[in-house]
C-alpha cells in the first residue's frame, strides 16, 4: 500500500469516526425523547437541528470514497451545535443566570432529567459530541489541505 | 467493506434502540405493577371519582383534564367498553390539568360534585367543550350559560370552586401524576398496567387482556 493510499484510508476512518459519533448521539437523543419521554426543550431542538443532518452529510462524504468537501459542509453545523451546547451547558450548570434563558414556554431548559455518574448532564454530552466533531474535522482539514 | 461497516453500524444501532426500548417498557410494566400492588393509593385516592361496580376486578384509571380534547373524544369510547362488560370494569378519574388555566375546569366539575351532579356536569362539559375551550382558548365564563342544563346551581359553583378542599385534590392528583410519570392526557392504567402506545385499539386490547385474565371464560 502506497503512502497516499494509507493517508486516504486514515482520512476515511476519521470521517467514519465522525459519522459513528453522530449516529450514536442521534440514536441516544431519539431514545431519550421517544422511549424515556424526556421532552426536548428549545435549546435541545436547536442542537438536534445541527446534529441530525450530519448523519447524512457524513455518510455522503464516505462514499464512494472519502470526499474532503464534506468538511466545508459539516463544520458550520458542528460549530453552531457546539456553541448552542456550550450555552446550554452553562445555563444548566447555573453559570449563566436563568433569567436570560430564551425558553419561557413548554419545557424548561434547566430541568434535570438525567445525570451520568452524578454530574454528566445531557447538554454536557451534547457539548462533548460537538466539540469532538469539531476537533476531528479540523484534523481532517489540516490533513487534506497539505 | 466500507459499505458493510456503515451498514452494520446502522443495524447495530437500530437493534440497540429496539432492545433498549423493550427493556425499558418491561421495567416500566414491572415498576407500575409493583406500585399497583404495594402503593395502590397512587392510582386511587379517597377523593377520586369512580364509575362502575366496586366489585369489578378490572380498574381503569384515567388521568384526564376536562379541557382536553382527546379526553372528551375518549369518554364515550370508554363508556362503551364499560357497558359492553357490565360490572366488570371500574373507572377511576384522576386529574392532570397540564395547561395553564385548565385547573379552573377541574374546580368547576368538582364544585358540581358537591351538588351531586358530577357525571352529568362532566358529560355536558365534554359535549360542549368546543364552545368553552376552543383551540386552547379557555373561557370558563361560557359555562355559566351551559351548566344549568346539568341541573346545577351556578352561583353555588362559583362559590364552591375556590374551596381549598378542591385545590388539595388537584395538588394530590398532580403529585401522583409525577409519581406515575404521566406526561399526556388522557393517561390510562389498567390494573396498574400503563397504556404503552396510545390509541383506541391499544386501550381496548389492554382492557380486554385484563378482562380475560380476571374473568377467565
Image: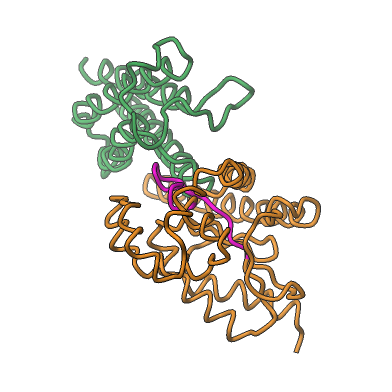
Chain colours: A green, B orange
- The quadrant of the rendering that contains the N terminus of chain A is top left
Is B57 rendered above or below residue B63? below
Vertically, is A80 above or below B1? above
Q: Give the range drawn in magenta.
A: B92-106
Residue A58 shown in magenta: no
Q: Residue at x 51, y 62 (%)?
A: B197
Residue at 34% over, 65% down: B146
Quarter holding residue A55: top left
Q: Position of residue B47 (x, y in %)?
A: 66, 54
Q: Where is residue B9 in the image (x, y as percent from the top left)?
A: 46, 46
Q: Quadrant of the C terminus of chain A?
A: top left
The answer, for residue A1, to whether it is visible in the render is no
**Count of all numbered marks drawn on residues in the image:** 0
Point out residue B115 in the picture as x, y percentages from the top left corner: 55, 62
A89 horizontally vs A112: left or right: left
Name the outermost residue toward the top. Answer: A95
State whether residue A17 is above or below residue B197.
above
> Which sits in the foreground, B83 or B142?
B142
- Tell me the residue at 74%/77% (across/down): B213
What x and y, as percent, mark residue A5?
31, 30
Residue at figure coordinates x 61%, y 44% from the top left: B165
Q: Looking at this view, is A67 or A7 the one in front?
A: A67
Q: In the displayed image of the protein, which residue is found farthest to the right?
A: B38
In screen coordinates, is A54 left or right of A92?
left
Residue at the far bottom in the pictured view: B217
Q: On the picture, is A79 further left or further right than B213?
A: left
Q: Toward which corner of the image does residue A91 lie, by quadrant?
A: top left
Is there any visible trace of residue B25 in the rendered image? yes
Amino acid at each position: 500500500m502506497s503512502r497516499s493510499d494509507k493517508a486516504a484510508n486514515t482520512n476515511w476512518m476519521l470521517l467514519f469516526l465522525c459519522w459513528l459519533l453522530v449516529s450514536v448521539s442521534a440514536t441516544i437523543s431519539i431514545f431519550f425523547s421517544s422511549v424515556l419521554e424526556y421532552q426536548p426543550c428549545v435549546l435541545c431542538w436547536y442542537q438536534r437541528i445541527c446534529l441530525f443532518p450530519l448523519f447524512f452529510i457524513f455518510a455522503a462524504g464516505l462514499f464512494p470514497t472519502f470526499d474532503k468537501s464534506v468538511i466545508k459542509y459539516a463544520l458550520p453545523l458542528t460549530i453552531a451545535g457546539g456553541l448552542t451546547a456550550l450555552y446550554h451547558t452553562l445555563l444548566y450548570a447555573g453559570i449563566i443566570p436563568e433569567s436570560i434563558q430564551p425558553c419561557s414556554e413548554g419545557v424548561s431548559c434547566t430541568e434535570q432529567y438525567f445525570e451520568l455518574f452524578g454530574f454528566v448532564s445531557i447538554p454536557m454530552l451534547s457539548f462533548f459530541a460537538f466539540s469532538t466533531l469539531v476537533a476531528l474535522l479540523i484534523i481532517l482539514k489540516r490533513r487534506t489541505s497539505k | 467493506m466500507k459499505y458493510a461497516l456503515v451498514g452494520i453500524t446502522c443495524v447495530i444501532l437500530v437493534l440497540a434502540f429496539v432492545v433498549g426500548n423493550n427493556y425499558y417498557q418491561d421495567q416500566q410494566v414491572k415498576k407500575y405493577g409493583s406500585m399497583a400492588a404495594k402503593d395502590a393509593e397512587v392510582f386511587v385516592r379517597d377523593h377520586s371519582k369512580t364509575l362502575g361496580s366496586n366489585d369489578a376486578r378490572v380498574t381503569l384509571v384515567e388521568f384526564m383534564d376536562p379541557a382536553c380534547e382527546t379526553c372528551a373524544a375518549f369518554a364515550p369510547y370508554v363508556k362503551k367498553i364499560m357497558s359492553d362488560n357490565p360490572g366488570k370494569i371500574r373507572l377511576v378519574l384522576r386529574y392532570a390539568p397540564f395547561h395553564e388555566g385548565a385547573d379552573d375546569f377541574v374546580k368547576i366539575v368538582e364544585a358540581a360534585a358537591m351538588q351531586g351532579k358530577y357525571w352529568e356536569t362532566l358529560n355536558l362539559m365534554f359535549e360542549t367543550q368546543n364552545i368553552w375551550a376552543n383551540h386552547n382558548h379557555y373561557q370558563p365564563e361560557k359555562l355559566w350559560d351551559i351548566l344549568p342544563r346539568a341541573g346545577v346551581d351556578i352561583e353555588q359553583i362559583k362559590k364552591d370552586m375556590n374551596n381549598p378542599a378542591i385545590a388539595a385534590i388537584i395538588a394530590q392528583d398532580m403529585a401522583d401524576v409525577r409519581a406515575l410519570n404521566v406526561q399526556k392526557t388522557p393517561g390510562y392504567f389498567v390494573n396498574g398496567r400503563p397504556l404503552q402506545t396510545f390509541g383506541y385499539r391499544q386501550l381496548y386490547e389492554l382492557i380486554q387482556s385484563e378482562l380475560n385474565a380476571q374473568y377467565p371464560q
